[in-house]
Amino acid sequence: MRVSKDDPRPPYAQLAEDLRRAIERGKYSAGQRLPSVRELAEQYDVSRNTIQRALDTLKSEGVVESHPPLGVFVRSTEADATRHSPEYLEIMRLLSSLQSSVDQLSDRVDAIERGTRRPPAQPPR
């Protein structure tokens, strides 16, 4: 989905609606970690601030919940939580933690690469 300039709603509201529908359709299930803010910004071709505002909207509606530094997760209902074994939930928590670590490392590598890129040296004349 791309943000529509013809839509009178602000971009963050459009994105919040799109994410809400994706959750309702089962693209993201209860307890599942959403893609990182960086990944969503790339996917929707908007700024990270716009994504963060959309996620804040969904948090205020109780659709998702934040678990720093693990990420943002689709909010589970009590019925969803009782469906999974403790072992499954622990594995999911560990996978989310690993994904968060990978995202953080990727951001650090990107920052290092941006900081060390220099124009090629000109040969002396």
Image: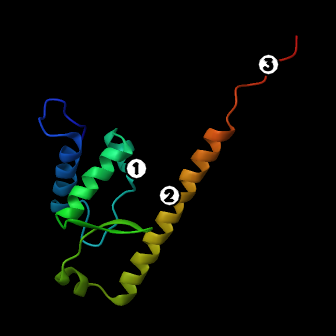
Tell me the residue that label 1 is attached to: 39
| Contact (Cβ within 8 Å) of mark 2 with mark 1 | yes
Is label 1 or label 3 in front? Answer: 3
Q: Quick check: 64 above or below 43?
A: below
Which type of secondary structure does the marked residue at label 3 adopt?
loop
Q: Quick check: 91 above or below 44?
A: below
* Residue 13 locus on image (x, y percent): 18, 46
- Between 13 and 29, the one nearer to me in the picture: 13
Tell me the residue that label 2 is attached to: 103
Task: Name the disc covering residue 22, or none.
Answer: none
Marks 2 and 1, how far apart in space? Answer: 9 Å
Tell me the residue that label 3 is attached to: 122
Amino acid on which disc 2 is placed: Asp
Please give the name of the residue rendered at 59% of the width and 46% of the height, measured from the top-left corner. 111
Choose the circle earlier in sequence order: 2 or 3: 2
Which quadrant would the N terminus be assigned to in this image? top left
Residue 114 is left or right of residue 118, and the answer is left
